[in-house]
């Protein structure tokens, strides 16, 4: 008892922690400033009252203006090249030394003339190196750059590209210059062949410095082009929105979105947002108060519902933080998922609570709230009896139609006209509807990862042609007939007392699939008077009977049966005993010590209403079938006896089922079984 109370307290603390975390995250995501609740388009009229600004703000340059400035800077930015002076000096000196050695001896009086010629070539070569020789000269020409900046000894100079040399043009210039000197053949024959040895590159592109300067210039671009002061009238009602006015309005909107427009005390603002969020969470929490007796109020469902609440609000916040129209965002996505995986009540409370907060992000809060609730209700009730996967897409179509009709109605009521700019709203709605199709994949993902099961999956599993059921029908036909009877009894009871009828029916069909492993050990499958238990001890027989639970779980895993259905296999006997063999053993060996674990099912006991009802239906159906006289009095006595014994054994202590619901279940079982086994008149033979 103490442990149960402690577990309950831990669960409550855990849920409160989830709510607190959700509240904090949502408050962080909500805008802390006033919203800019105006819609406008370039070239249209301003349909609101005269707009005076409540604070100073800068007028930002338009994107096109900023892009033009950036392009101008990029075009004006000169590529930077470093000139290596040492290379030129070294090459020139080498040339002079070699030329002096190679020039043939001169006659008396001609030595000065030869030296003068070498000095002239030297000056030309030095001039070429001063201008710069570039390896990738052709690429520079292809870039259509007319001027570059050359850095020499940390001093920059702007140089026209046409004055720079390539390796080829440098050699040609030096060669032609040497020829222009009209040197004697003996000297030309020596000088010309060695000219190319002393032509090499001395210019190198400095990409890092070029990009650094360009980046600095781009960063220094001013984003604004003036100021609008508090109290100034920005635009008048019915005034045409010119490009200039449009830019001013965009600048004001940007200031609001940058949270620079906080009016009043920031603490009070956060307090208000917290109260708004708590109101939404409170509405969502009312579901657990009014439907606490449902099995869907499990901790797992609690996490799904409030996780969906948080995810839906964060999804809607994208519209504010990224300036996207909120009607383009599929905020009904997780409401659809909740509707299918839990129930329509949970989805409805989730819809109402999230819509309250999401409307805070919308420019036109009233229109969005109207659209969201109407489309949400259509989604919930069009999917309340989901039996085919195609219904999901039909429901999304209905959602789009609902959104569109309400959006169109608001447009024509407010503006008495419909123009091309309004058509963008329908584009957003189409986007929204297409994204809602992701719910199909999310449902599948949640089923696999978190053990939820949708009605579609249950319908598919309850098909008698499912491999597991086909195997049971073939190997243990008596057991399959028993499972059908149990399914009918349990389903009818759950319809009356509340719960998931489709889940309990599917669970009933699979609860005994383990008997397919050893069908002959179960009386409903024994034919021709063959009973293998006759040659076994009571303890051995009990083990064969009990093993059908373990075998059933193994078979269910093999066929990828969801955990929600496997729970029925695991719990349909709970921790009860195989009483026929247990009592037989006790009666035959009254003085012998008995190992009760041999006769006890592995369990656990049922933890949900559906599993508890199945346990009752399973025991009752098997017992009534064994009655020799199936009168209403006998049926009533046996049903009451079996279920009362289960109660006294505390089989339903962990299940969320009340004594009143158990009483109703008894009456349903008695009524149904009495109708099935009522006496029938005998048909008279035809007299000849």
Image (spheres, rainbow, N blue to C red):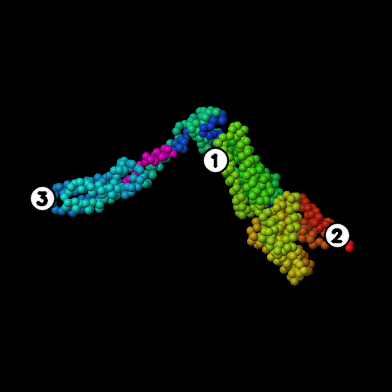
Residue 81 shown in magenta:
yes
Per the image, is 602 magenta? no
Q: Residue at x 61, y 54 (%)?
A: 449
Dot 2 falls on a residue whose secondary structure is loop
Mark before the other along the chain sequence, 1 or 3: 3
| Circle 1: element type | loop
Task: State the residue in front, 275 or 118.
Answer: 118
Range shown magenta: 67-82
Quarter of the image that includes the C terminus: bottom right
Q: Residues within 10 Å of mark 2 (few under 14, many from 20)?
A: few
- On residue 683, the disc is 2
> At x 21% / y 51%, what residue is drawn?
192
The residue that label 1 is drawn on is 324
In the rendered structure, the answer to whether residue 10 lies left or right of residue 123 reads: right
Q: Nearer the viewer, mark 2 or mark 1?
A: 2
**Can you give x and y, in whole percent of width and height, for residue 229 in the image?**
49, 30
Asked which secondary structure carries label 3, the reply is: loop
**What percent of the width, then of the height, locates residue 653?**
72, 54
- Mark 3 sits on what residue? 108
* Farthest residue, direction front: 688
Q: Is residue 312 left or right of residue 509?
A: left
């Amino acid at each position: 008892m103490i442990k149960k109370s402690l577990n309950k307290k831990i669960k409550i603390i855990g849920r409160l922690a989830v709510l607190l975390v959700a509240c904090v995250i949502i408050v962080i995501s909500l805008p802390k400033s006033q919203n800019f609740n105006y819609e406008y388009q370039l070239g249209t009229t301003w349909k609101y009252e005269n707009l005076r600004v409540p604070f100073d703000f800068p007028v930002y340059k338009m994107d096109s203006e900023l892009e033009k400035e950036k392009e101008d800077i990029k075009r004006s930015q000169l590529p930077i090249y470093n000139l290596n002076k040492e290379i030129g000096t070294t090459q020139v000196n080498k040339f002079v030394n070699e030329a002096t050695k190679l020039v043939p001896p001169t006659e008396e009086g001609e030595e000065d003339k030869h030296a003068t010629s070498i000095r002239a070539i030297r000056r030309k070569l030095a001039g070429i190196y001063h201008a710069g020789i570039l390896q990738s000269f052709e690429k520079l020409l292809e870039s259509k750059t007319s001027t570059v900046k050359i850095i020499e000894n940390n001093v920059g100079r702007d140089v026209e590209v046409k004055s720079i040399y390539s390796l080829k043009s440098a050699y040609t210039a030096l060669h032609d210059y040497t020829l222009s000197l009209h040197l004697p053949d003996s000297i030309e024959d020596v000088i010309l062949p060695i000219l190319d040895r002393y032509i090499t590159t001395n210019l190198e592109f400095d990409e890092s410095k070029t990009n650094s300067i360009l980046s600095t210039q781009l960063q220094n671009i001013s984003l604004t082009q003036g100021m609008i002061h508090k109290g100034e009238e920005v635009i008048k009602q019915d005034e045409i929105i010119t490009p200039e006015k449009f830019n001013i309005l965009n600048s004001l909107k940007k200031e609001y979105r940058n949270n620079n427009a906080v009016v009043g005390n920031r603490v009070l603002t956060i307090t208000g947002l917290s109260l708004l969020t708590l109101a939404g969470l409170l509405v969502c929490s009312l579901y657990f108060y009014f439907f606490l007796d449902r099995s869907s109020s499990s901790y797992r469902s609690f996490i799904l519902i409030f996780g969906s609440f948080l995810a839906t609000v964060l999804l809607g916040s994208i519209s504010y933080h990224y300036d996207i129209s909120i009607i383009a965002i599929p905020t009904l996505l997780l409401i659809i998922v909740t509707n299918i995986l839990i129930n329509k009540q949970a989805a409805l409370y989730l819809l109402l609570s999230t819509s309250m907060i999401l409307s805070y992000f919308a420019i036109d809060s009233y229109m969005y709230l109207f659209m969201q609730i109407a489309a949400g209700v259509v989604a919930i009730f069009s999917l309340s009896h989901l039996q085919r996967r195609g219904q999901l897409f039909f429901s999304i179509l209905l959602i789009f139609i609902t959104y569109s009709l309400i959006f169109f109605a608001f447009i024509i009521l407010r503006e008495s006209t419909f123009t091309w700019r309004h058509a963008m709203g329908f584009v957003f709605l189409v986007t929204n509807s297409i994204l809602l199709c992701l719910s199909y994949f999310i449902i599948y993902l949640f089923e696999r990862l978190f053990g939820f099961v949708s009605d579609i999956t249950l319908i598919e599993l309850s098909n008698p042609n499912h491999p597991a059921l086909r195997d049971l029908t073939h190997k243990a036909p008596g057991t399959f007939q028993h499972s059908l009877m149990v399914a009918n009894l349990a389903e009818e009871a759950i319809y009356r007392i509340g719960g998931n009828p489709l889940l309990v029916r599917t669970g009933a069909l699979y609860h005994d699939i383990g008997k397919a492993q050893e069908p002959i050990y179960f009386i409903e499958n024994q034919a021709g008077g063959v009973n293998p238990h006759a040659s076994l001890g009571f303890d051995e027989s009990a083990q064969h009977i009990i093993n059908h639970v373990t075998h059933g779980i193994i078979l269910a895993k093999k066929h990828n049966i969801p955990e929600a259905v496997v729970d029925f296999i695991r719990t349909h006997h709970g921790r009860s005993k195989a009483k026929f063999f247990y009592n037989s053993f006790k009666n035959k060996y009254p003085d012998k010590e008995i190992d009760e674990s041999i006769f006890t099912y592995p369990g656990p006991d049922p933890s949900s209403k559906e599993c508890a009802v199945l346990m009752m239906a399973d025991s009752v159906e098997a017992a009534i079938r064994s009655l020799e006289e199936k009168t209403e009095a006998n049926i009533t006595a046996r049903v009451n006896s079996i279920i009362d014994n289960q109660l006294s054994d505390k089989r339903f202590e962990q299940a969320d089922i009340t004594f009143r619901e158990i009483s109703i279940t008894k009456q349903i079982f008695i009524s149904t079984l009495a109708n099935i086994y009522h006496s029938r008149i005998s048909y008279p033979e035809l007299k000849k």
